[in-house]
Image (tube, coloured by chain):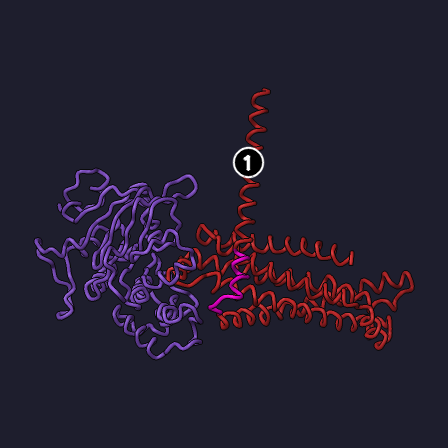
Chain colours: A red, B purple
Amino acid sequence: MLASSHEGEVVAGGSLLRFLKTSLASFQEFLFLAGRAFANLFRSPHYNDDVFLQMDLIGVGSLPIVVPTGALSGAIIALQMSRALSTYGANSEVGPIVALTLVRELGPVLTALLVAGRNASGIASELGSMKVTEQIDAMRALGTDPIQKLVTPRLFATATMLPCLTVVADAIGWIAAYLIAVPLLHLVSSNYYWSSSWRALVPNDLAQGLIKPFLFGIIIALVGCYYGLRTTGGTQGVGRATTQAVVSASIWIFFVTFLIDKIFVNL
Amino acid sequence: MPDIPGPIVDFEQVSVRFDDTWALRKVSFKLNAGETHIILGAAGSGKTTLLKAAIGLVGVDDGDIKLFGQDITSLTEHDLYPLRSRIGVLFQEGGLFDSLSVGDNVEYPLLNRQNPNGQNRNGQSGSEPSSVERQAREALRFVELEQTFDKFPSEVSGGMRRRVGIARAIVTEPQLVLYDSPTAGLDPITANTIMALILKERDVRNTASLIVTHRYQDGELMADFRYDPQQQELLHLPKEDGARHRTRFIVMKEGEIVFFGTREELASSTDEYVKRFFKHEE
């Protein structure tokens, strides 16, 4: 009985060690991919057309989901805050609260999650399909670096487009909150809403609001590419890579948010 | 392109391991200009790994591979790109880029070779689209598919995709072409058409070829026939013709070469495993 319990512990220890080794190796592989993708930004050839195509697909293509989500987020914050603030007789603070919540947190995180759902999955499935149909090998055999051709343009496009999409989402959310707080609920005057919310924002908030989506963009592109390029197992593998990309990107987005908040809160 | 004095491909005791399994074990052979090696073997015997190792798509654990006289085992991925652009490769499913038209797929190696260190697409750094298009059309004409130039790979049949793959592999007139199961999954008529094109390419341009296949008939065709450019047809080689020895057979088993020789030597092999890959006449 004792012996079998000891054997069980050894097996469990062995599996844990294997799991840790695999995770560490995967992370190392991810860092290697990231390093090469960044290094390629400064190395020829530059596939400018692919960069613009990806900027269009990721940036313009994501507007139809980012705009309504931004608008609804602003409207929901205004509605929820109206009730909470009226309890304390602080209706006038609706503008600053909306501005700070959107710019610091909800704008970047919600936009990144939407873009992760749409583009990390899209990138993983596209690259995964290319991998299982030997297009990646064909590219290497034809003398083209797949990281240079596929990863770097997506990295650059997502890292530049996500901050732009976040600014759009923030602006739309701010306007939607205004429509709820001023014409609908008459919480504050129009002038006061705009001036108070603008005054509430300090450079620290704007920096957070732009640094976060920039980092999220890098995460989304690299995670999507990483899972896409390591796809194995045919169409089933492509589905698995897509799911893993979205899940990992979403978790990383929250983790990085936590880290950045920790840094900026202490500033 | 200057002729290479020694073999075009030279494997010396090459071993490749995936996790705990040896995909290749102490594999050695040489391939000279104008020669064809037909690689036969059961599924999972290491045929495709051998092909991929030959151009550095798979890393080698032990041994040396020389390509055009240059040892590739010590080269980085980046250093391999210029070397690879001198080789044509046909992948099992064609490996065509879905997002590019048939014409763009065939033009790709030309643009890539013209500008190995610059922009390679869209004529961004001095490529001559008209000349590139002319060569791509010529390659497609070679495989009798010029009419598909503007179509996408998804709009043509499996056999046609394989032929487009051949056009892309040979468009740069490489000295070495690797074919991974060029006839797999095709009906006998299309398979023979594909093999006739490979044979034509070998005899018109004196190309060295490594052909992975499951069909013994593919190797038989390569060994027994030659393409006559004057008559534009395949002619049967007499039994004593020395040209037959340009085609050799490799039989692989569990990552090892268990047979290397001519068609006649394969036919007379007494090894039970090797005999499975030779079509005995009834």
Magenta includes B199? no
Q: Is residue A219 left or right of residue B142?
A: right
**Along the viewing direction, whichever of A73 and B196 lies nearer the viewer:** B196
Secondary-structure class at tag 1: helix
> Mark 1 highlights which residue?
A15
Q: Quadrant of residue B269?
A: top left
Residue at the spot 23% in from the left edge and 53% down from the top edge = B37
Query: Dividing the image into 4 quarters, which one contains the C terminus of chain A?
Result: bottom right
How far across and how far down the image is residue B216, in percent? 21, 50
Residue type for callout 1: Ser
Relative to B124, say whether A36 is above or below: above
Q: Quadrant of residue B161?
A: bottom left
Q: Residue furthest right?
A: A89
Q: Position of residue B212 (x, y in %)?
A: 28, 52
Q: Which residues are magenta?
A: A33-46
Q: Nearer the viewer, residue A75 or B99?
A: B99
Does the stretch in magenta take in A41? yes
Q: Which is nearer the eye, A157 or B233?
A: A157
